[in-house]
Image (cartoon, grey):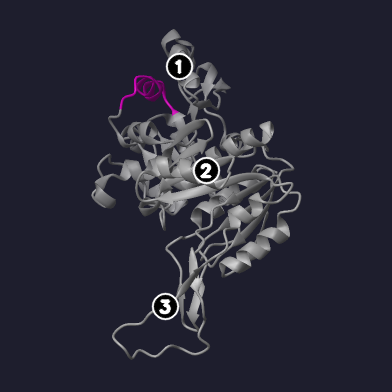
């Protein structure tokens, strides 16, 4: 079943008469459960007003390359990292030509160059312009770079000509976008993930924990379920909704997370350890609140169980995937952890850039390779991660 629930769609509108269809397209995106943000070229505003698109999307429309209202005035970078998918509709002959040559002279061309998300074009132009050899060469170039082409359709055009060049109808574009998320490359695979922080109580009101938001694990769980996997997410305390199709098991401590993992790991294809498990816990948990009295207080800690190591000991262990959130020597420390934990695949990242952030940049490390994944929102990066995991599973 096609779905765009919780998908982040960036709709880019350029200056063509078909821009009027973007009102209905935005309405359908929203109805399908997507979060829609809109970027318009200056010419696009001559055909449909930003106010109309703002009212339909529920979000501010992005018009300027340098945005004084966004963080550090770099709105195009924020948008580029935010999107799960960028759809340019209509994509005019001029816009296609500018993208072919890598121009970045407005908000839309710039964010496309900065985005790691899939990019789709819905061409719309006069049939003679579409048939022109320059346009065809430009389209072929963009497709060779991984751009998706939705259309154009054949039919009557605004100028009175008949032929190929009409933008696909909004209903057709919605279907084509949804298909990009429905690959099923993990169909039938059983994945067990851990996510979020753990909490280790000191007394009834205090605990040891960390800044993990759980967003990376939840993005992986959501994308894995969308790709057809049977997903069990063992989650520490977070403030996130359960992704559709995911079986979430709530735990608090490292011991509880280990117990739940061992209970559900049987017959799984992959174990993805994303959780930021507290390394230590107090030897003793006080039954009553510790009163503030002395200027100093000593707290004796003991190591928590190593969940990855325990799963790795199993006689029929699944594919082992770990995460290394480091503050320095990210790749070198990631390689050490890969070997020490006997992992098949590890994703290393900068810890200070990850906690509570919607974006992430990681390096995928195996025994004989390193692959750097471009900075993007965690759902986009999650899909790249899962594709690498699927490749590992196919070889296992």
Residue drawn 44% across the image and 76% down it: 300
Q: Earlier in the sequence, mark 3 or mark 2?
A: 3
> Which numbered disc, 2 or 1, marks the residue that appears first in the sequence?
1
Where does label 1 land, which residue?
A: 141
Residue at which label 2 appears: 338
Q: Is residue 191 visible?
A: yes
Q: Which residues are magenta?
A: 91-103
Residue drawn at the location 71% of the way across and 54% of the way down? 265
Q: Secondary structure at mark 3?
A: loop
Q: Earlier in the sequence, mark 1 or mark 3?
A: 1
Q: Magenta span has 392?
A: no
In the rendered view, would you say 49 is above or below 173?
Answer: below
x 69%, y 59%: residue = 262
**In the image, residue 88 above or below residue 253:** above
| x and y percentages locating residue 89 in the rendered image | 47, 33
Nearest-to-viewer mark from 2 and 1: 2
Asked which quadrant contains residue 362, the reply is top left
**Which of the two marks, 1 or 3, is nearer to us in this view?**
3
Q: Which quadrant would the C terminus be assigned to in this image?
A: top right
Residue closer to the observer: 303 or 385: 303
Cα gap from disc 2 to disc 1, whole angstroms: 39 Å
Expressed as whole percent of the image width and height from the top left, the position of residue 253 reads: 56, 69
Q: Is residue 286 left or right of residue 93?
A: right
Q: Residue at the spot x=47%, y=43% of the render?
A: 336
Pinpoint residue 239: horizontal percent, then vertical percent: 51, 66
Within the image, what quadrant is residue 248 found in?
A: bottom right
Q: Secondary structure at mark 1?
A: helix
- Kindly identify which residue carries mark 3: 299
């Amino acid at each position: 079943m096609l779905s765009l629930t919780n998908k982040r769609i960036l709709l880019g509108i350029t200056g063509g008469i078909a821009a009027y269809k973007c009102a209905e397209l935005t309405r359908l995106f929203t109805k399908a459960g997507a979060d829609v943000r809109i970027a318009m070229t200056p010419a696009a505003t001559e055909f449909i007003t930003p106010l109309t698109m703002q009212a339909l999307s529920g979000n501010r429309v992005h018009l300027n390359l340098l945005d004084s209202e966004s963080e550090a005035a770099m709105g195009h970078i924020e948008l580029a990292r935010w999107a799960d998918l960028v759809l340019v509709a209509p994509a005019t002959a001029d816009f296609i030509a500018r993208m072919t040559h890598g121009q970045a002279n407005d908000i839309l061309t710039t964010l496309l160059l900065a985005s790691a998300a899939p990019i789709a074009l819905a061409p719309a132009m006069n049939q003679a312009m579409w048939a022109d050899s320059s346009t065809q060469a430009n389209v072929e170039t963009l497709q060779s770079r991984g751009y998706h082409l939705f259309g154009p359709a054949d039919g009557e055009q605004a100028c009175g000509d008949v032929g190929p060049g009409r933008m696909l109808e909004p209903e057709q574009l919605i279907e084509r976008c949804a298909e990009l998320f429905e690959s099923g490359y993990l169909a039938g695979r059983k994945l067990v993930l851990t996510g979020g922080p753990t909490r280790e109580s000191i007394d009834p009101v205090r605990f040891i924990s960390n800044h993990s938001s759980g967003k990376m694990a939840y993005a992986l769980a959501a994308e894995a379920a969308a790709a057809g996997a049977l997903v069990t997410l063992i989650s520490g305390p977070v403030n996130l909704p359960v992704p559709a199709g995911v079986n979430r098991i709530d735990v608090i401590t490292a011991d509880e997370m280990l117990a739940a993992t061992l209970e559900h790991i049987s017959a799984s294809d992959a174990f993805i350890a994303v959780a930021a498990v507290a390394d230590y816990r107090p030897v003793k948990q006080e039954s009553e609140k510790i009163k503030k009295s002395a200027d100093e207080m000593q707290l004796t800690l003991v190591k928590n169980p190593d969940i990855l190591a325990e799963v790795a000991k199993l006689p029929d262990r699944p594919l082992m995937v770990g995460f290394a959130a480091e503050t320095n020597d990210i790749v070198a420390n990631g390689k050490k952890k890969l070997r020490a934990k006997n992992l098949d695949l590890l994703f290393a990242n900068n810890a200070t850039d990850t906690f509570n952030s919607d974006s992430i940049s990681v390096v995928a490390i195996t025994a004989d390779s390193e692959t750097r994944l471009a900075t993007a929102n965690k759902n986009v990066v999650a899909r790249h991660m899962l594709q690498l995991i699927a490749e590992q599973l196919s070889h296992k």
